[in-house]
Amino acid sequence: MRIVVDLNRCQGYAQCVYLAHEVFRLNGQEALTYEPNPDDERRLQVERAAAACPVQAIVIARVDGAEGIATS
Amino acid sequence: MTLRATVAELVREFRASGRIVIVGASLAGLRAAETLREEGFTGSLTIIGDEPYEPYDRPPLSKQVLKGWVPADHTKLPRMREVDADWRLGVAATGLDRATKRVRLADGEQVPYDRLLIATGTRARQWPNPTEAALQGVHTIRSRDDAEQLQKALAESPSRVVVIGAGFIGSEVASVCRELGIPVTVVERGSAPLVGALGGVIGEIAAQMQRDHGVDLRCGLGVSSLEGDSGGHVRRAHLSDGTAVDADVVVASLGSIRNVEWLEGSGLAAGFWGVGCDAGGRVFDINGVVTDSIYVAGDVARAPHVLYEYQFLAMEHWDNAVFGAEVAAHNMVNLEPHYHPHLLLPGFWSGQFGVNIKSVGVPPFGDEIVFTQGSVQERRFAAAYGHRGRIVAAVTFDHGKWLEYYGKLIERSGPFPPPPPGWDQPPDMKPMPAEFPDPRVPTAVPDVVLTGHAPSERTAEFRPRRH
C-alpha cells in the first residue's frame, strides 16, 4: 500500500506512532518519518493510524498501483 | 444560439473531448491529473516526464531514504483516483510551439494540446566545475536515483563527508550523516546555516545545533575546488581560506535550478525565476499578457501573492505543488467567474538533528524577528517575523502545534509584534533585526528589455546578460 503524510499538517501528536510503530517513527520530539510503502499486512494498522490522526494528515491511496505506465 | 450558450457548449465539448498535456510527472503533475478527472474532464490526457519513474514523493529522499530505513523506490505517490492518462515517461519535453500548439519531445515526437500544464519543477544545481562534478563520490540530491546513490555511498561508512551549502537539504544530509556516525564537514558561504530562508538570528541557532551534534561547520567560506585521486574518486575539498578537508563523499547542496530551458523561444514569461503566472495558474507571455491555454503549477510556477504586496513568489514547497496543481487543473476546465485563486499561505518543514523545523508565511519578507514562545536554549520555540508593523511569517523549532495560530494572524494581516499567545512566553519579547542577507548585491540574472515603438510592435525581448 502507498501512503503519504502531509507534514505541513502534521503536528506531532504521535497517535500514528502509537498505533503503527513499524510504519511511523518520531525523530526527536515531533519530526515524523514514515515508511511510504508499508507491507499490505500493515493495512489495518495504517488505516487505524490515519483515522486516529487528530489533524488527518495521513493520506492513503484510494486506487492501487500504477495504471498503464509505459516508458519510452 | 446566444453567445453565452455557445461558450457553454464549447466548454462542455472541451471537457468531453479536449486534449490536455501535462509536462512534468511529479507531485504537481499527478495531483493536477487527478483533479482534472475529478472535475469531469473525460478528454485525452498525456503526462510527460523525463524520469522513467511514475510520480514519487521527494521529502523522504533526504531523510528516511538516506538513512537507509526506506528504499528509494518506496516513495511512489499514492493514487487518489484513476487518471486514465497516456504516460510518456523517460522522455523530456524539449520545446513548445504555441502557434501550432505542440510540445516537442526529446525523441523527436510532437504532442498536440488544446490546453497545457507546465509542471517541470526544478533540478539540483550541480557542482559548477564539470570535471570535478564527474568525480566518483560527488553527489547532488534531488531525484530518486540521486538518493539511492548517496544512500549507498553513506552505507559504505565513508571516512568523512563534505556537504557544500547549509540550506535545508545540506543540513538534512549533515544530520543523517551524524545519525549514522559519519564525520561530516559543512561548508557554507553565508554567515550561518539556513540564513537565506530564515535569517541570521535563526541561522545562529541552527549553527549551534549542528556543532552540538558534532558537525564541523565552516561558515563564511566556499569550496574552491575538489581534488580526485588517480582512480577518479574525490579525495579532498579545497576551501577558499586555503585550507583543505579530506573526504571521500562530497554532497553539493547548492539550491535548485528551474526547468525552463525547454520553453526558450516559446514567448512565455519563463526564465531564471520560474514561469510567471497569475494567481489562477495562467501563464503570462513575455509581455506580461495572460495566455488562455497554458497553465503552470509547482516549484516552477511564480505568481503574485496578495499577502506579500503582490510580489511574484516561487514556492518550492510540498503543499504549493498540491494546491497549485488543484487550482490550475480546476481553472483549465472552468470559465470565469468560476476560477479558483491559489492563495496559499506558504509553509515548509524540515527534520534535522532531531528537531522539527517548520515555518509559515514568507520569512525573508520580514526584517524583524521576535521570539514569542518557548526557549531558545532548549530549542523548543516559536518566533514571528515582521515587516512594517505586521506579522508576515513565523518559524517553530519543535513547536509545530502553534503554527496554525501564527498562520491565522498572518492571513489577517495581524500586528507585529503579535499579541502574546498567553502561554509559555519567553522572558524577553523584544523584536530584533532578522538579519537576512542584503538583497542589493549585483547578480548575473538576465534582463528583460522593451523593444519597438508602435503599440503593436512594442514587445518585450529576453536578453541574457553576458559577462
Image (tube, coloured by chain):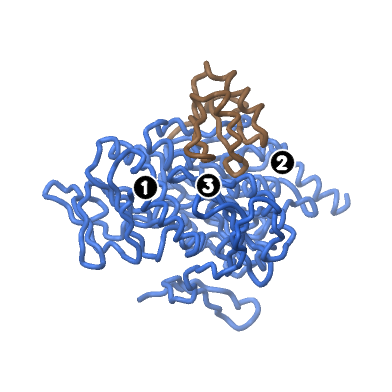
**Residue located beneath label 3 in the image:** B23
Q: Can you name the residue that lies furthest to the bottom here?
A: B453
In the picture of the structure, the residue carrying the numbered disc 1 is: B213
Res B296 visible: no
Residue B253 in view of the camera: yes
- Whether the residues at callouts 1 and 3 have beta carbons within 8 Å, the answer is no
Whether B357 is drawn above or below A37: the answer is below
Res. B416 mark: none
In three-dimensional space, the C-alpha distance between marks 1 and 3, rounded to whole angstroms, equals 42 Å
Judged from the image, the secondary structure of the residue bearing numbered disc 3 is strand
The answer to whether tags 1 and 3 share a subunit is: yes
- At label 1, counting other C-alpha atoms closer than 10 Å, the crowd grade (few under 14, some 14-19, many 20 or more) is some
Q: Which mark is residue B15?
A: 2
The chain to which mark 2 is attached is B
Q: Nearer the viewer, residue A37 or B55?
A: A37
Measure how far apart labels 1 and 2 are at the Cα level. Answer: 56 Å
Distance (Cα) linking label 2 and label 3: 19 Å
Q: Residue furthest front?
A: B427
Tag in front: 1 or 2 = 1
Residue in the image at 73% along x and 51% along y: B340
Q: Quadrant of residue B382?
A: bottom right
Left of B361 or right of it: where is B256? left
